[in-house]
Image: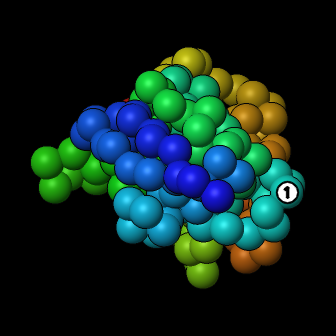
Amino acid sequence: MAKIPLVFKVNGEQQEILVQPYQTLLSALRDELRLTGTKEGCSNGNCGACTVIVNGRTADSCLVLAAEANGAEVTTVEGLSQNGQLHPVQKAFMKYGALQCGFCTPGFLLSAKYLLDSNPNPTEHEIRLAIAGNLCRCTGYDKIVRAIQAVAQAEV
């Protein structure tokens, strides 16, 4: 099957790649652009490990065809830090022990960033709703919630 061109902005940089028509955005990011921070967990949109931000909204990249991202702006976990400085959400996850094995962490970080960009002062309930699409088998969620609250309260 013939590959199709995909032109989009990833982490602020214009990218032009060729993808298979059936290729997911997750696969394009990992296999074509070598941005391996985005993880493949379930491949059916249930775990959130592959969460990225597409045009200002979170998306499970395992459910998005790469071709659907043509012309889009995509942020992956690699795009959170700027000029060698960790994003406040990344700092908070480290400070509050909100990560353990790290597999789910990129998805949580992007879900947290999206929440805080759209609601800088969320309640605990709003935080829990915002991360409900992300599964973690290690942390129990309380440390993740506390880390996001700390960013909202500028404690990081």
Q: Is residue 60 above or below residue 26?
A: above
Left or right: residue 147 compared with residue 33: right
- Between 13 and 96, the one lying in front of the other is 13
Q: Is residue 106 above or below residue 103?
A: above
Q: Is residue 155 above or below residue 134?
A: above
| Residue 68 appearing in the image | yes
Q: Residue furthest bottom?
A: 101
The quarter holding residue 34 reads bottom left
Residue type pointed to by label 1: Asn
Instruction: Name the spot of residue 19 as percent of width and height, x first.
Output: 52, 53
Q: Residue furthest left?
A: 83
Instruction: Name the spot of residue 106 as percent of width and height, x first.
Output: 54, 58
Instruction: Name the spot of residue 45 as percent of width and height, x first.
Output: 82, 52
The quarter holding residue 46 reads bottom right
Left or right: residue 148 compared with residue 21: left
Instruction: Name the spot of residue 44 as percent of width and height, x first.
Output: 85, 57
Is disc 1 surrounded by few (<14), some (14 to 19) or many (20+) residues within 10 Å? few
- Quadrant where the N terminus sits is bottom right
Q: How many numbered marks, from 0 up?
A: 1
Colour scheme used in the picture? rainbow
The residue under the point 28% across, 50% down is 81
The residue under the point 38% across, 60% down is 33
- Between 82 and 88, the one lying in front of the other is 82
Q: Which residue is mark 1?
A: 44
Q: The residue tagged with tag 1: helix, strand or loop?
A: loop
- Quadrant where the C terminus sits is top left
The residue under the point 59% across, 44% down is 66
The residue under the point 45% across, 40% down is 6
| Residue 147 appearing in the image | no
